Image (cartoon, rainbow, N blue to C red):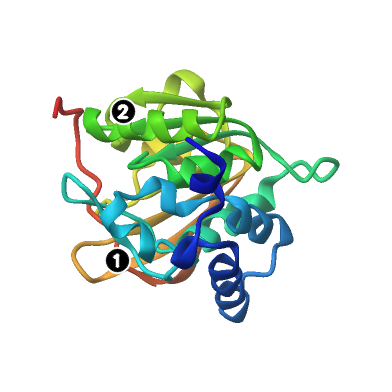
Amino acid sequence: MNNRDLTGIGMTSQRTRERLIGRLMDRGISDWRVLDVMRTTPRHLFLDEALAHRAYEDVALPIGQGQTISQPYVVALMTQAVLQSADPSTGRLGKVLDVGTGCGYQAAILAQLAEEVISVERIRSLQEKARRHLAALKIRNVRLRLDDGTLGYSGEAPYDAIVSAAAPPALPQALCEQLADNGRLVIPIGDGEGQTLELIHRKEDSFHRESLGMVRFVPLRRGPVER
């Protein structure tokens, strides 16, 4: 991968990225940490070449296997929400669980704001694609796991933050239980078009739920698949 690939040209240029950042700010994304990471992470590298020119539009795009790379605004909103659990002295999260690796874009964003990211994907071909993308960007603090994301990843719990890029019909108790005290989980919940993005904040053994708005995500499915 050469420098031109990383910096982009035309519709993937830095100027195009700056326009996206302006749109995110207009929609209420105000955390400078999130905006900086979104500005410098080359989203076009996570897409097939035929779609790379659309990388900095504020839309979800297909990545194969019936899955999508999330809309930049939604990625920024979810990341901003969980960053409230960051260490106040460093501004960074500790350990984060990313449910639904997909092409690896959300994991790449989180990796630049956390000490460690555990990212779970059920489809092996997508996991391998994400592995290549993260390696190309020399991101080394993401550990990829092929597993059932509905169960979280208890072997590495507790987590300061959990981000889910797929929607279960109801809040999975397993994910709540894997949050550290003061940890935050952001997850879309619901069927079809009736999904709500929810922020769950753990305080000892109680969980406060807050709605962040209506969204549309792929469903959270059980079990890993070899394809």
> Quick check: 120 above or below 31?
above
Which residue is at the front of the view, 113 or 186?
Answer: 113
Residue 216 is tagged as 1
Badge 1 marks a residue whose secondary structure is loop
Callout 2, which amino acid? Glu
Which residue is at the front of the view, 95 or 36?
Answer: 36
Image location (x, y in percent) of residue 124: 23, 28
Callout 1, which amino acid? Arg
> Quick check: 177 above or below 163?
above
* Residue at image coords 70%, 63%: 31
Image location (x, y in percent) of residue 78: 51, 57
* Residue at image coords 64%, 37%: 114
Q: Earlier in the sequence, mark 2 or mark 1?
A: 2
- Determine contact: label 2, label 1, CB under 8 Å: no
Query: Quadrant of the rendered structure where residue 32 is?
Result: bottom right
Label 2: few (<14), some (14–19) or many (≥20) C-alpha neighbours in 10 Å:
some
* Residue at image coords 53%, 69%: 16
Q: Which residue is most to the top?
A: 155
> Quick check: 123 above or below 39?
above
Residue 7 visible to the viewer:
yes
Badge 2 marks a residue whose secondary structure is helix
Q: Nearer the viewer, mark 2 or mark 1?
A: 2
Q: Which residue is most to the right?
A: 89
Position of 226 with respect to 199 (left or right) is left
Residue 128 is tagged as 2
How far is disc 2 from disc 1 in space, using C-alphas?
Answer: 25 Å
Query: Quadrant of the rendered structure where residue 61 is?
Result: bottom left
Residue 22 is tagged as none
Residue 152 visible to the viewer:
no
> Quick check: 184 above or below 13?
above
